[in-house]
Structures are given as structure tokens and as C-alpha cells.
Image (cartoon, rainbow, N blue to C red):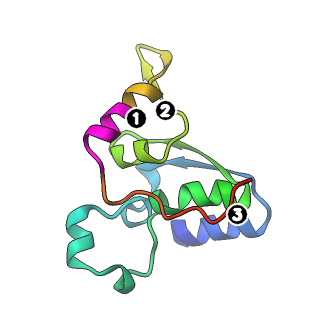
């Protein structure tokens, strides 16, 4: 089964939290970079990347996500909190991540949120 179908099934059975490890996820489930967006039109791509849905899943469906990310800074745009492990210490680096996100905006950000909880 695909990562996308697993997420839909979790929603259907009433999950209120998804735990996602970037290392074990399908790349096209997690993101589509600017080059792929230019090459393959969104209407031709059957999977909406999770980075575009994660906020609406929380706001529209009450499903939180805890993600372990090591290679995709596009999630800084949509994260409420960013923590970093440094020498076995957990540090809140949300402010720094948001500053980096403002300096380097991505086009893969979230879809508009339809309602608030």
C-alpha cells in the first residue's frame, strides 16, 4: 500500500495523530519541488504532497502530525513547532526555522485552509 492510502485509511478509522518519518516515506508523497511542478502540471499528478495538506488535516479534521524530517526544509513553512536534536539535547528552533523559511520561500507550501477549529 502507498503512503497516501495509509494516511487516508488512518483518517477513516478516526486517527487524530500521524507519526511520519521522512526516511521511510515516498518522496512524491512528501513533496514536489519547483522543478517537478514546472515539468508535470498539478492536474497530471495524482498525489497532492503532504506538505500541501498537513495544515488542513489539522484545521479541517483535527489530525495532528509529528514528523521526523532531516532533508526537506519546505516543512518549515507549515510547521507550528520545530525541534532539533543537538548532542542528545532537544532544542526548540521554531524561530530560526521560520526565519529561514521567510528568507527562502518555497512554492510547495500549504493549500488554503477551509475552516478553523
Q: Which residue is mark 1?
A: 98
Judged left or right of residue 82, residue 12 is right
Gap in angstroms between the C-alphas marked 1 and 3: 29 Å
Expressed as whole percent of the image width and height from the top left, the position of residue 60 reads 69, 62
Q: Is residue 104 magenta?
A: yes
**Contact check, label 3 and label 2, Cβ < 8 Å:** no
Residues shaded magenta: 98-105
Gap in angstroms between the C-alphas marked 3 and 2: 24 Å
Q: Relative to the observer, which residue lies in front, 86 or 78?
A: 78
Residue appearing at x 69%, y 70% in the figure: 9
Task: Using the rendered view, name the quadrant where residue 11 is placed.
Answer: bottom right
Split into 4 quadrants, where in the image is the N terminus? bottom right
Q: Earlier in the sequence, mark 1 or mark 3?
A: 3
Find numbered disc 2 in the image and state the secondary structure of the residue it sits on: loop
**Contact check, label 1 and label 2, Cβ < 8 Å:** yes
The residue positioned farthest toward the bottom in the image shown: 44
Report the mark closest to the observer, 1 or 2: 1
Q: Main secondary structure of the magenta part?
A: helix
Report the mark closest to the observer, 3 or 2: 2
The 10 Å Cα crowd at callout 3, few under 14, some 14 to 19, many 20 or more, is: some
Q: Is residue 67 magenta?
A: no
Find numbered disc 3 in the image and state the secondary structure of the residue it sits on: helix
Q: Which residue is mark 2?
A: 82
Task: Using the rendered view, name the quadrant where residue 49 is placed.
Answer: bottom left
The residue positioned farthest toward the right in the image shown: 14
Task: Using the rendered view, name the quadrant where residue 103 is placed.
Answer: top left
Q: Which residue is mark 3?
A: 10
Amino acid at each position: 500500500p502507498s503512503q497516501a492510502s495509509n494516511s487516508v485509511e488512518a483518517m477513516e478509522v478516526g486517527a487524530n495523530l500521524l507519526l511520519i518519518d521522512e526516511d521511510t516515506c515516498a518522496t512524491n508523497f512528501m513533496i514536489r519541488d519547483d522543478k517537478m511542478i514546472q515539468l508535470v502540471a498539478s492536474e497530471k499528478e495524482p498525489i497532492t504532497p503532504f506538505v500541501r495538506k498537513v495544515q488542513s488535516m489539522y484545521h479541517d479534521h483535527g489530525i495532528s502530525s509529528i514528523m521526523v524530517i532531516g532533508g526537506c526544509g519546505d516543512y518549515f513553512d507549515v510547521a507550528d513547532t520545530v525541534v532539533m536534536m543537538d548532542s542528545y539535547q532537544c532544542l526548540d528552533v521554531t524561530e530560526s526555522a521560520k526565519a529561514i523559511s521567510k528568507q527562502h520561500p518555497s512554492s510547495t507550501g500549504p493549500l488554503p485552509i477551509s475552516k478553523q477549529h
